């Protein structure tokens, strides 16, 4: 099982016309050799799959990558109230330049670009 650190930075949008390296996530998750999320490896060591949300002007939040009936999400507290849903995460290819959509608990969605994998 290969856990990698994946950095996601907010992509260009009306609020961030150039994107922003100060707004995003660092995800520590298992990836397959071809760069997809390794769900089997995640199942065997769930607590190792973590996320850190960094947002300029706000304290960092740390949580876990979870899987619910609605799909994959970042979760910071027990329960679903603060979960940030990830659009089709199981189908995404993680490599620099690819995109991931995160939906906040409020329902607002933002697109993030994969900027690095280590």
Image (cartoon, rainbow, N blue to C red):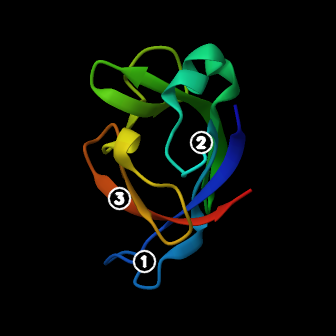
Residue at 65% of width from left, 36% of height from top? 62
Real-space Cα separation, disc 3 to disc 1, in angstroms: 11 Å
112 versus 75 height, above or below: below
Tell me if I can see residue 51 in this picture.
yes
Outermost residue toward the bottom in this view: 18
The x and y percentages for residue 109 are: 29, 53
97 versus 99 height, above or below: below
Label 2 neighbour load within 10 Å: few <14, some 14-19, many 20+: many
Q: 75 or 38: nearer the eye?
A: 38
Residue 90 appears left or right of 54? left
Task: Identify the disc placed on residue 110.
Answer: 3
Q: Earlier in the sequence, mark 2 or mark 1?
A: 1
Q: 17 or 87: nearer the eye?
A: 87
Label 3 neighbour load within 10 Å: few <14, some 14-19, many 20+: some
The x and y percentages for residue 105 are: 33, 37
Residue hosting label 2: 31
Real-space Cα separation, disc 2 to disc 1, in angstroms: 29 Å
Q: Nearer the viewer, mark 2 or mark 1?
A: 2
What is the secondary structure assignment of the residue under circle 3?
Answer: strand
């Amino acid at each position: 099982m290969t856990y990698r650190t994946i950095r996601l930075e907010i992509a260009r949008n009306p609020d961030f016309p150039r994107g922003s390296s100060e707004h995003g996530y660092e995800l520590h998750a298992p990836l397959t050799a071809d760069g997809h999320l390794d769900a089997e490896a995640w199942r065997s060591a769930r607590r190792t799959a973590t996320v850190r949300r960094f947002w300029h002007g706000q304290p960092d939040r740390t949580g876990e990558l979870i899987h619910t009936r609605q799909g994959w999400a970042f979760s910071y507290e027990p329960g679903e109230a603060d979960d940030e849903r990830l659009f089709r995460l199981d189908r995404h290819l993680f490599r620099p330049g690819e995109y991931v959509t995160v939906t906040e608990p409020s329902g607002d969605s933002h697109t993030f670009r994969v900027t690095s994998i280590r």
